[in-house]
Image: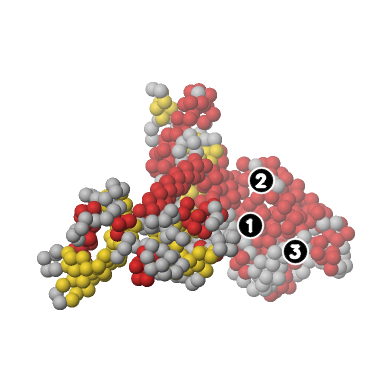
Amino acid sequence: MTTPGHDGDGATALCAIDADGVVRGGNASFAVLLGSPLDELIGEPLAERLDGAFDLAETAPQDVVGRRPDGERVRLRLTVAPLALADGPRQLIATITQRLTAAGSGPVGGLEGLLHGIGDQLYAFLIDDTGATTTTFAGPGGDALLGGTIPEGTDLITAWRRAAHPDDRAIFDRHLRTLRSIKHSEEAVRIVGLDGKARTISFRAWPTTAGGVVVVHGVASDVTARVSLERVMRASFGATQRGAEALDRARREAEHQARTDALTGVYNRRHLTEVMAAVLAGALHGAPGVAVLLLDIDHFKRINDTYGHAAGDAVLVAVARRIQTSVRKVDTVARFGGEEFCVLVDGVLDDDGLFEIAEGVRLRIEAQPVLVEGVDISVTTSIGGARAIEGLTHADDLVDAADRALYAAKRRGRNQTRLYSEWRFEDLIAEDPEAVRIAEALSLTASLREGVSSMHPMQVADLAMRTAEALGQPAAVVLRSRLGGWLHDVGKVAIPDRILTKAGTLTEDEWATMRSHPAIGGEIIQRVSGLKEAIRAVRHHHERWDGTGYPDGLRGDAIPIEARIVAAADAWSAMTSDRPHRAALEWSVALRELQGMSGSQLDPVVVPILVRLITEDRARLSSRILQGDDGIDRRYRSKDEAA
C-alpha cells in the first residue's frame, strides 16, 4: 500500500469542514480515500466516516480509522488547521493521509518508516550568535518538498532559503529572526522546487537555547493543496458575499421605492401609516407629542385645467420640497393622495406649537410662485391639524380629525390653518348636513320606540356638553360628548318592542338582548362617516367605573372620557324622566341616587361637576318661577317642580 503524498500514486486528501465538523468541500483524493463520491460526503459530519476520538481544536496529527462503504477500514492520520477567512463563519481544513499498516510495509521500516508516514519533514538546526544556521537533523521527505535531492554538502536551511520565491524570501528571513529571538514561529512560504514546480511550504518551529546557541526543532509541510483550496473558498466566499451585498442593495432599493412617492420623492401613504402606528404606540407608553398635519393644494384642478397635467406635476414636486424644507428632521412628510400631503409631527406638546409649524409650512408654500416653463403659478394650501390626545390615539381617528379640520379651513375661504381643537358642532352641520339629519332621525326613532320623550337625548347631549366644558376638556371631547349624548341610545332601534317597552322585570335572556344596544349603536354610527366622533361614547356609555359594565367590561380611566360623561348625564336624565316601567324620581331623591353612584357606577370626578351644573340649573329655574317667568326651559322640570 502506498502513502498518499509520497512516492505512491496517491495524493494528499483535503476537505473543508465547518465548526460543527460537517464536510463543506474537498478534493478528489478525499473522495477516493473514503471510497465515496464527493457530493455524498459534502453535508455529512466527518465523524460518520472516521472511527476513533478526534478533536477539531487539536492542530497536532491524530490517528483515526476511515470506514469505506464496502466495509474496508483504512488507517489514517488527520491534521486539522483553521482556514483563514477575513469574514464569515469559522472554517477548518482537514488534511488526511494514509498510515503505514506495519513496519517495513512502506519505503522503510522502524523510525525511518514512521518519519515517512508522517508525510512532513522533521528537522533540527542551530543558530549561532552571528545568525548562521547549521542543520543537525533532516528527516525523510525533504526531497518531495524541495522537488529533488539537495546538492551534497548544502545545508538544509540554506537550501530552503535559496528555493524561496523572491517575493517570499523576506518571510523566510523573518521566520529565522523570530526563532533567533527564542519565539515560536509559523510561516507559509512559496518556493520554487528543484523540479521547477511552485509549492507552498508551511514551516513550524520551536526554539530553545543551549550553551548560548539557539536550538530549533521544526516540521516542514506541503500545504499547496490546502492554500489552493483556501484561495478557491476565499474567492467563492467573496463572490457569495458580493452577491449577497448586491441582493441586499437591491432589496433596500426596492423597499425604498415601495415606500416613496415616485413623482415627488417624499414618502408615500403606506410608509406614513406604518410609521404613524409605531409612533402612536410609543405615545401610549410615555412618548407624547404626536400630531398630524393634512395639506391640500387649493384649486389644484384649476391648475391642471389651465396649465396642463405636466405643470400640475411640477407644482406637486415643488410643494413637496417646500414642505420638507419647512418642517424639522424628526417630522415625516408623505404624499397622501392626489394633491394632498401629510406631515407626521413629533414632539409638539400644545396647539400653539402645532399651529406655528403648520403656518410656517403654509407661508413657505405661498411665499413665491412655482415657475413652470417661464410661467409663474401661484400656489396656496389649506391645512388641518390634530394632536394625539385622549380619544385620538389611533391613526385612523387622528387622520380623520385632521381631515375635518382641513375641510373647515377650506370652507372658511382656503389658504389658512385650522386645528381640530377648534372644530365645533356647527362645523359638523356645515360639513355633513345629511349626517346630522340621519342622527336626528335615529335619535327620534329610538326615543319613540322606547316610549320616552324625544327631549331625552337632547337633554343628555346638553348636560354632557356642559359637563365636558366644565371639566376643561378640549373642544374635540366636548363635541364627542354632545354627539354621544344625542346618539347614545340609537342601538335600541334594533331591540324588539316586547323587550323595550316591557313594564315588568326582564328575564335573563331579555337583559342580554337589552345590553346589546350600545354595541349595536356603535356599529350603526360607524356606517355614517360624519357621526364617527360619537362611536366610543355610544358603545361605552354603559361601562361602569368599577369594571362591571358592558359591553367590554372597561374599568376606570380605560373608559373613554366622553363615555363617562354621557353615562352620568344619561343616568340623571333617566332618573328624572317618566319611563314605561316607572315614574320619574323626585329631584332630591334622584340627586342622592346620582351621588351614590360616584366611584362605583360613575366617574367620581365627573359626578360632582354634573351635580354642580344641575344644582345651578335648579336654582335658576326656581328664580324664574318666583319671578313668574313663563320662558323657563321645561325640559329640566322634575315631578316635584311640576307639582
| Quadrant of the frame with the C terminus | bottom right
Q: Nearer the viewer, mark 3 or mark 1?
A: 1
Question: What is the quadrant of residue 146 in the picture?
Answer: bottom left
Instruction: Determine the CA span between mark 2 and mark 1.
Output: 17 Å
Task: Report the disc number at residue 574.
Answer: 3
In this rendered view, identify the residue nearer to me: 475 or 543. Answer: 543
Residues at marks 2 and 3 touching, judged by CB atoms closer than 8 Å = no
From the viewer's perspective, tell me whether residue 124 is left or right of residue 34. Answer: left
Residue 129 visible in rendering: yes
Mark 3 neighbour class, 10 Å CA radius: few under 14, some 14 to 19, many 20 or more: some
Query: Which numbered disc, 3 or 1, marks the residue that appears first in the sequence?
Result: 1
Instruction: Please state the horizontal and vertical placement of residue 265, each as a whole percent of the image.
Output: 45, 38
Amino acid at the residue labelled 3: Ala
Q: Which residue is under mark 2?
A: 529
Q: Nearer the viewer, mark 2 or mark 3?
A: 2
Give SS at disc 1: helix
